[in-house]
Image (tube, rainbow, N blue to C red):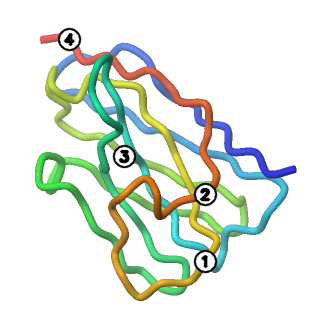
Amino acid sequence: QVRLVESGGGLVQAGGSLTLSCAASGLTISSLDMAWFRQTPGKEREFVSGISGSGPSTWYADSVKGRFTISRDNAKNTLYLQMNNPIPEDTAIYYCTVAVLWSNRQRVAPRDYLYWGQGTQVTVSS
């Protein structure tokens, strides 16, 4: 059974920092593309950042570029999202996800990913 468990969310002040983790079990993530999405009430799930399984390729939504950093530790089967200088607009539930089919595209749509975590709440205060 595949499980993705996010942790590290909470309340952070604008301009601070926060690191989210996503521990995977039931599959080996080392060759799989992974990503972070976020969602606020009444809105669709929004792409935040992705990372390729085969190399160091990363991609970001314009809204977080330069502030957030995605990384992975394949030995720990864990995905991370370092959030620096968060702003109140970053407040959302953050989800990690993994794709199981190979693609040469930098995927940003929820439909491109298969397994999802339960999410972790991030609240940024001004």
Badge 3 amino acid? Gln
Badge 2 amino acid? Leu
Q: Are marks 2 and 1 in contact (CB under 8 Å)?
A: yes
The CA span between labels 1 and 4 is 38 Å
Q: Tag 1: Cα neighbours inside 10 Å, few (<14), some, or many (≥20)? A: few
- Residue 82's disc number: 3
Q: Tag 2: Cα neighbours inside 10 Å, few (<14), some, or many (≥20)? A: few
Residue located 42% across and 49% down the image: 36
- Residue 90's disc number: none
Residue at the spot of label 1: 101
Earlier along the polypeptide chain: callout 2 or callout 3? 3
> Along the line of sight, which residue is nearer the eye, 35 or 87?
35
Q: Are marks 1 and 4 in contact (CB under 8 Å)?
A: no
Residue located 34% across and 71% down the image: 58
The kind of secondary structure element at disc 4 is strand
> Along the line of sight, which residue is nearer the eye, 75 or 46?
46
Q: Are marks 4 and 2 in contact (CB under 8 Å)?
A: no
Position of residue 62 measured from the top left corner of the image (x, y, whole percent) = 12, 55
Badge 1 amino acid? Leu
Residue at the spot of label 4: 125
Q: Tag 3: Cα neighbours inside 10 Å, few (<14), some, or many (≥20)? A: some
The CA span between labels 2 and 1 is 9 Å
Position of residue 95 measured from the top left corner of the image (x, y, whole percent) = 49, 39
Earlier along the polypeptide chain: callout 1 or callout 3? 3
Earlier along the polypeptide chain: callout 4 or callout 3? 3
Residue at the spot of label 2: 114
Asked if residue 81 is positioned above or below residue 11 in the image, the reply reads below
